[in-house]
Image (cartoon, helix red, strand yellow):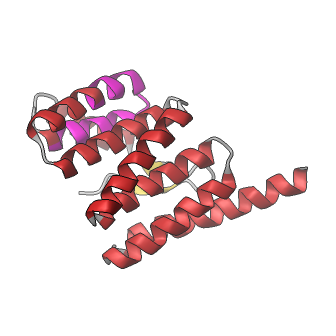
Amino acid sequence: MSFIKGHDPETLREIVDPRQCEKRLDEIAGQRSLPDLLERVWLLKVLGRLDEALDVAEHAVRQARMAGTRRDLLRARILHATVLQFRGAHAAAIAEMTTCGEEAEGQGWVGIAAFAYQHRGKTHYDAGDYVSARGDFKRTLFLRQEAGADDDQLQSTLLAIDAAERRRAEASVAV
């Protein structure tokens, strides 16, 4: 079941039904598996419960480091970085997403690399660096096409490219 109903064209954030997210959060509250921890991080993040999201994200990274695969660790680190992004720690989020994206590309894990660059683009976008955001979104589009991503993923990336181009144009007119 997808909790994402769409993406806000201005903020690029996921549009979710908060009640549905809260319900799912209650369902998995006592679960300890890495997938459940990662889902809890995401749910807490989209609900704006960022302190809790950060705590669970740090726990998920530790668990992935101790008992997961390298792919698991990259996913956990990227999700942790998205919480940093939502908290306004853009430089730290960008640095972590860059490291994860480069490692994923080096391993040939195109889907994970695309995930890292899409979120790095969103972080650049939040920080007002629309040129870098657009570059990351274009890179993500290429990687997602290469990986055979579904239409929803491609559409969210195309929406992000359009938003970055629009914001860049608005910023250049304002100068």
139 on left or right of 29: right
Compare residues 94 and 50 and report the one nearer the observer. Answer: 94
Q: Is residue 32 above or below residue 112?
A: above
Q: Is residue 50 magenta?
A: yes
Q: Is residue 125 above or below residue 59?
A: below
Q: Identify the residue at horizontal 89%, vertical 57% (top origin).
A: 173
The image quarter in which residue 5 lies: bottom left
The number of numbered discs placed on residues in the rendered structure image is 0
Rendered location of residue 136, percent (x, y): 54, 60
Extreme front residue here?
106
Q: Is residue 4 visible?
A: no
Q: Quadrant of the N terminus?
A: bottom left
Compare residues 140 and 36 and report the one nearer the observer. Answer: 140
Q: Identify the residue at horizontal 22%, vertical 33% (top origin).
A: 60
Q: Is residue 58 magenta?
A: no
User: What secondary structure is the stretch in magenta mostly built from?
Assistant: helix
First to last magenta residue range: 35-57
Q: Is residue 32 above or below residue 164?
A: above
Q: Identify the residue at horizontal 54%, vertical 45% (top origin).
A: 123
Q: Is residue 58 visible?
A: yes
108 on left or right of 163: left
Rendered location of residue 147, percent (x, y): 32, 74
142 on left or right of 105: right
Compare residues 66 and 26 and report the one nearer the observer. Answer: 66
Rendered location of residue 133, percent (x, y): 60, 55
The image quarter in which residue 145 lies: bottom left
Q: Identify the residue at horizontal 46%, vertical 50% (top origin).
A: 119
The image quarter in which residue 158 lies: bottom right
